[in-house]
Image (tube, rainbow, N blue to C red):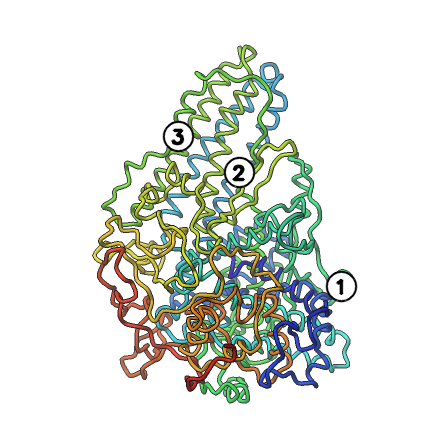
Amino acid sequence: MTVMPGPFTHIYTARRVSELMANQEGFTSDFIRDMDGPLLDIQQLDPDLLAGLEPAECAAKMQAWPKFTALGSNGPDLFFFLQDYNNIAIPCDEIMLAMSLMYYLDDQGRLDDPYAGLVDILGEVSQTWAAILRFIIKLDQLWKKFMAVWNATIGPIVDAAGKVIDDLTGGLLRTLGQAFTELANDLLALAAEEILSEGDVFGWFSLKMRKGFDEQAFLWSDMTHYRRTSMVPARMIAHARDMLRSDDAATREHADQLIAFALGWVCHVGTDVVAHSFVNEQCGGPFRTHWQRHHLIENHIDAFNYEQTKPGGLLPADEFCGFQDTYPGLNQSALYFALQIPQGIDGLPQAAKQGALRQPLPEGDDQASQNQRKALLDTDGALPPWLAETIVQVFIEVYAHPSEGGLVDLENKLGEGDQPHPRNLLGQPFQDGLHLGTSLIGKWLGILGVDNAGMALDDIRKQIAPDAPFTVPEGFPMPWEVQAAYRFMLSWFKRSYVSQFDMDKPQRPTVFTPPASDLNNLGNDFSGPPDFSGVNPNDDPLSQLCEAIASILDWANKVLQDAGQFIYDLVKTAASAGTWPVREAIYDGIIEPAWEVCENLRRVLVHMGYLMPQSGENWPDGELRKPSEIDLELITLGHTVDSAFKQALAAAWDPLGNLDSDPALTDEGLRDPIDALNPWLPVRTTKGQKPPNFGGIANDDAVEYQRPWAFPDRTNDPDPKKAGNYLEAPLTAAGPYPQDTMPNRLLSTTAPTSNAARVDYEGAGCPSDTDSHNSQYIQHPSRGQRGESMNPLGDPAVFSAYLIGQIANNPRFIANFNLDADRGYAYLCWDWDRMKAGQDAPKDGQLHPFPPPVVWPEGADAWVRPDPVPVDTDPQYANPLPLQLHYPGRECNVQSEPRIQ
């Protein structure tokens, strides 16, 4: 589960930004290119500030501490790993304490399998990471168990085929047959336990503002993407400047590391603002309304961009984070090395402070090579305590009330007045409670299976939950919680970027062809699709999904059972096996069916967003080793999914029972994303249908997770008279990129932009001002044509470099862009227009009352579901209540002419 846009694109963009600033040709001391035009008065940089952080110096610090830069480039997304749920039933701080304890025990070598500890901890939370991580870990565990038998049997069987009769006597084959049977049973059990008990697990990543809640309910990942987004890195840079004046060499080194981290964070801001507009154009709306489709598209964008860094690709090579021969695809990239800050960094020799880097991996499948691979891929990291403390301190300064430590000057500068902040964590009261007793630590030691801690529990507390050097207000994370979130992120990345759930397609033996009669059952099973007759079209969509998945796994089970039976039959006839070609029979009867089952399972999980798509690979002789799973159509603006995936769905793997074979749903054609209607609402069950029954997932009738690869301009209702979807009014421009644009364009540094246009966007007083600028700069209705592929803010690297200059060196810069490009291109941070909260005010998931929106958004319980409409209904007028929102602290500008005609 990666995060937005994908981590590779963020890391890679920050590295291109440092190169852009270091290369002075065509790039000025004002952090802009000559071709962009001069800075306007409001954009002028402060000479005193600029003297310490000119472009070359910024580039030098980013390149001197590349891992701090890379971590900063994913900075706001780090907080997706903080367990700060807006649910009063979940003990958020206790979950973070358990994680911190687990990582401490793992560092001490006290846990056999830290991932088993994560499952135990997340078992207390039936949401988000719990549902997804439990599924992926269990899938990984059962696949490892099968692969252990596969590697121990298939290799010797095929390599020693001539000795099958004399030496193997069926022993290895019998073991492999048992493994097939066990894999089939395990897959069905996993489906019953995990897949079929949960529906929209990604729905827990949807934003709390979708429900109309105010900032009290926000997660910190919401806050860092939707509120005061420029102020956070600005305050980090201010802290670093103070630290640079210290007489202590270690503090000055921390300052350089903090600058690298903060400038990486600015790159995240610039990349999100622009790249999310690209994703939104293809997605049909922002992450807020299309969370799983958004995530799916970003996975494929990230995998595509990584693949394009290989020799002959569209992007420059980068040994630090890009393609290497033994790291051929993003799902095998070990990307976590780019974010790994070495443990105990301050006590290490200078050279060791850069941490571990990826090393070439052995290619062999023998146990020695596998052990060496495992050792080379194993690395741990730790967020330095001083950095965690600085992050929390900055959050307090930017978001807290002045009485809690918030900066009055910053609040006055923004003109927003008192604003709420998240209140899902307990802050200082939880920390104080740890001083009163150690029962929580004792509880979690027991759950993690540690009977003897080896030291006093309060001493363990000092290691896993040390006190902060300042008071942490309610709702803010403790520094040790930020450190635990970082460790969880590394754990997750190890699952995401060193795929365990795959298998090379074994090379076909160049020997005789076995008799067809020996393979009839397998051929009949494998040539046809699963039997979807058990999928009742009258059932609700989730039931259909469950029935279809059951059909898929039943089909896989039949293939595996017949493969197992084939093995048993082969054992029985081993005495006479010399009369026919053993190796070819084993390949066709055992090896290829098993590989096909594995790959088909992967394709489903990849297109549902659970797994990262793999890059295609061939064996040295050109035979297929791994098929490419990167869906180029899915990430080409205006297109839909590729034909290969459509064929796979229609033939065997349609999770909705051949729904995607319905031309009414699949004949989408090409879209012009600039002129396209935007944004679309989530795909829902048709009004009147039974909503899905979500196990532990919150009640919601959005069902886009069933077909996240499909554009959301229609629902899944098979009746075209009721399958029309709706738009979220008022309509907006999603982004500036035209049809057929590919993701590598996001990493360009040569496309035109304009500093004058940037001033217009930064000075917008309300959403309608931004809409007017988009109409002028993107669609150009006054000239009857759209812009010549101009991105008004600039592509991500160019815009990020500009933002570094403004955020670091222009005290007058106060523009805070919405990092999700929600509700349209270049929108600033916005909130719903709200009524005053009375005594009967609604309450969020933590029972905090909040002022209700004037117009409830689509995710709120109070939102009225519209009546079904035909697919040809004009969706602009089918749902007539437009949202009402504003930019906090700003008012709409008096109509004026744009700065570019």
Q: Is residue 286 above or below residue 507?
A: below
Instruction: Rate crowding at label 2 as few (under 14), some (14 to 19) or many (20 or more) other CA atoms within 10 Å.
Output: some
Nearer-N-terminus badge (2/3): 2
The image quadrant that residue 804 belongs to is bottom right
The image quadrant that residue 36 belongs to is bottom right
Instruction: Rate crowding at label 3 as few (under 14), some (14 to 19) or many (20 or more) other CA atoms within 10 Å.
Output: some
- Residue type, numbered disc 1: Leu
From the image, tell me which residue sits under label 1.
348
Residue nearer the viewer, 446 or 94: 94
From the image, tell me which residue sits under label 3.
558
Q: Secondary structure at mark 3?
A: helix
Q: Gap between marks 3 and 1, in whole Å?
A: 56 Å
Image point (54%, 39%), residue name: 627
| Residue 769 percent location from the top left of the image | 43, 79
Horizontal relation, residue 33 to residue 82: left or right? right
Check residue 145 in the rendering and tell me which mark sits there, or answer none: 2
Q: Secondary structure at mark 1?
A: loop
